[in-house]
Image: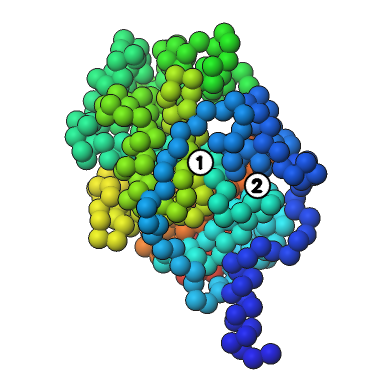
């Protein structure tokens, strides 16, 4: 077989579905039922996860708001030559194809210099699936805060939340500054264990209108205990992003869906419509409910990687994005290996302990967008991991992170710390 033909076949394999093999836990995840979506009470669990988490806007009883795609989508070309991607995990070598046979990824996209190096969809998903991001949405909310700051809707990141979100006046969250909220450093104790009885469960039930749960604002006002003085320590808390969402709507007089459409989705040249889940109060769930196609997640990541530019257009302020994603710009307590044993934390972005600026949007159950701007490498992945969060060695996150390092090594990135 001649070399040009071999290259053509390799390229086709990189961009198309893998051979029809059994996918991890496919029966438990709903394949026999053609991946159902369930309803507002059952969408989160098996066997509805694959179906619901790739089409939340179709789940009966769940309210969403449409974010219209751009009139003309920005090109996201495929690389002219395939790239072999491999990684090393627990002293064994694996290929990208083997990763997909080992882990519950519903979609995976790898880019180098704005070109698609690999694109795969699993469990019957297609390229128009609108994948639920969980807490990747927090980074989207932070981007909107940057846009509101640039436009003067928000006067200063050092303003207290209740300057805008009047419903929080007189509460500890109301007195917390926007910058402290962006860094999740309010010092307030908000529990997030994903066990159904923590504060995030209370907030989710209130937002969803569960009888007896009160309102989301009631939950936010009930958070009064402190673990630290404000601004001194990072502790992950989805409530802080929920407050940011309420600041945005109050400061601009618009809903977050419209802001996302006008300030992000249209400028990046999104190929598909996207959706925010909204609560019974009409407020978008800013901390974890944005839904978009894999390619449009990549377009958003490219804009951030390019310091806020799409072509010649400056969509978001460069300085704000560097404050959000550069470990060198963070206070000591928020730097990598200080904020957490591994990651640092910026403005709702996770920061790798690497010499080269490298950052991430992350959501529970394996939602991922990793970016290394200087080398032009990005990986977007959506997943249906069984566990939400926990110890690093008890989750597929360990192998996911090994894959990312393998992507960097395979494509000429920098993994030095």
Left or right? Give the position of 388 relative to 327: right
Q: Indicate the secondary structure of the residue bearing disc 1.
A: strand
> Where residue 62 sits: x, y (%)?
56, 28
Left or right? Give the position of 185 relative to 206: left
Query: Residue shown at 30%/12% (left/top)?
Result: 169
277, above or below 85, in the image:
above
> Where residue 56 sits: x, y (%)?
57, 36
Q: Quadrant of the C terminus?
A: bottom left
Residue topped by disc 2: 396
**Can you see residue 266?**
yes
> Where residue 132 sits: x, y (%)?
55, 40
254, above or below 359, in the image:
above
Q: Earlier in the sequence, mark 2 or mark 1?
A: 1
Residue topped by disc 1: 291
The chosen color scheme is rainbow
Query: Residue shown at 52%/77% (left/top)?
Result: 81
| CB within 8 Å, label 2 to label 1 | no
Left or right? Give the position of 412 relative to 261: right
145, above or below 414, in the image:
above
Front in this rendered view, residue 272 or 250: 272
Structural crowding at the residue carrying mark 2, measured as other residues with C-alpha within 10 Å and reported as few (<14), some (14–19) or many (≥20)? some
The number of numbered badges drawn on the structure is 2
**Can you see residue 352?**
no
């Amino acid at each position: 077989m001649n070399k040009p033909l071999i290259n053509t076949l390799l390229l086709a394999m990189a961009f198309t579905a893998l051979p029809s093999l059994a996918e991890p836990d496919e029966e438990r995840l709903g394949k026999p039922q053609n991946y159902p979506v369930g309803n507002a009470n059952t969408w989160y669990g098996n066997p509805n996860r694959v179906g619901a988490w790739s089409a939340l806007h179709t789940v009966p009883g769940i309210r969403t708001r449409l974010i219209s795609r751009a009139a003309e989508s920005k090109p996201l070309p495929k690389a002219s030559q395939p790239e072999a991607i491999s990684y090393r995990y627990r002293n064994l070598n694996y290929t990208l194809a083997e990763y997909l046979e080992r882990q519950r990824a519903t979609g995976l996209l790898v880019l180098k210099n704005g070109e698609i190096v690999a694109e795969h969809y699993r469990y019957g998903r297609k390229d128009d699936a609108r994948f639920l991001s969980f807490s990747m949405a927090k980074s989207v909310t932070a981007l909107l805060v940057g846009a509101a700051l640039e436009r003067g809707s928000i006067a200063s990141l050092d303003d207290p939340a209740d300057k805008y979100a009047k419903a929080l006046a007189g509460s500890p969250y109301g007195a917390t500054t926007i910058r402290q909220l962006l860094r999740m450093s309010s010092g307030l104790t908000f529990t997030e264990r994903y066990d159904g009885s923590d504060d995030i469960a209370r907030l989710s039930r209130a937002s969803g209108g569960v009888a007896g749960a009160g309102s989301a604002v009631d939950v936010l006002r009930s958070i009064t205990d402190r673990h630290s003085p404000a601004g001194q320590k990072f502790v992950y808390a989805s409530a802080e992003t929920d407050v940011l969402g309420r600041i945005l709507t109050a400061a601009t007089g618009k809903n977050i869906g419209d802001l996302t459409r006008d300030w992000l989705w249209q400028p990046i040249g999104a190929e598909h419509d996207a959706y925010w889940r909204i609560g019974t109060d009409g407020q978008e769930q800013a901390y974890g409910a944005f839904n978009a196609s894999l390619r449009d997640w990549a377009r958003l990541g490219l804009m951030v990687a390019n310091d806020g530019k799409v072509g010649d257009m400056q969509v978001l302020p460069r300085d704000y994005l560097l404050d959000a994603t550069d470990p060198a710009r963070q206070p000591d307590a928020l730097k990598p290996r200080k904020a957490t044993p591994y990651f640092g934390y910026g403005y709702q972005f996770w920061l790798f302990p690497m010499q080269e600026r490298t950052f991430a949007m992350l959501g529970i159950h394996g939602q991922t967008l990793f970016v290394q701007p200087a080398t032009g490498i990005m990986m977007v992945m959506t997943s249906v991991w069984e566990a939400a969060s926990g110890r690093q060695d008890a989750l597929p996150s360990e192998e996911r992170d090994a894959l990312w390092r393998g992507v960097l090594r395979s494509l000429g990135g920098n993994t030095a710390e």
